Image (cartoon, helix red, strand yellow):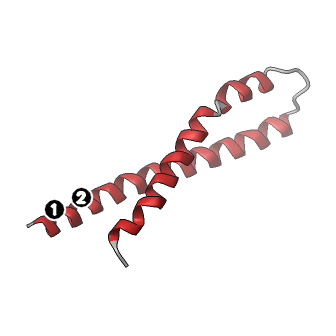
Amino acid sequence: MSHTTLEPEIREIHEKLQRMSAENYADRLVEIIHRTGWTETQVHLVRVVLDSVVHHLDGIERAQRALVEAAEEIGSTKAT
């Protein structure tokens, strides 16, 4: 299996991250949370999900950084 077969997945990840960013979830969520009628339980539920999303995004960011660093090392090893 050639290392060039990795390119479609790399591009897919990039496209998904761009789509997520373009969706502008923040503005939509801010509008929703300013509507009246929220209970403490509902606020807590949304807080838990927000915390989970942040945690997952932090992990994705770390994984992407580690992936690029590892690929750089592999690529520079192959070049020498």
Q: Which residue is mark 1?
A: 76
Give the secondary structure at mark 2: helix
| Residue placed furthest toward the bottom | 1
Q: Is residue 13 left or right of residue 39?
A: left
- Determine which of the numbered discs, if any, sits on residue 62 in the image: none
Q: Is residue 1 above or below residue 59?
A: below
**Residue at (76%, 22%) from the top-left corner?**
31
Q: Which residue is mark 2?
A: 72
Give the secondary structure at mark 1: helix
Near-viewer residue (29 or 6): 6
**In x, y percent, where is residue 36?**
88, 21
Near-viewer residue (16 or 51): 16
Question: The residue under label 1 is which amino acid type?
Answer: Ser
Q: Is residue 29 left or right of residue 21?
A: right
**Residue at (76%, 40%) from the top-left corner?**
46
**In x, y percent, where is residue 63?**
42, 57
Quarter of the image that includes the N terminus: bottom left
Near-viewer residue (11 or 32): 11
Q: Is residue 49 left or right of residue 17?
A: right
| Residue placed furthest toward the right | 37
Image-quadrant location for residue 2: bottom left
Question: The residue under label 2 is which amino acid type?
Answer: Glu
Disc 1 + disc 2, Cβ < 8 Å = yes
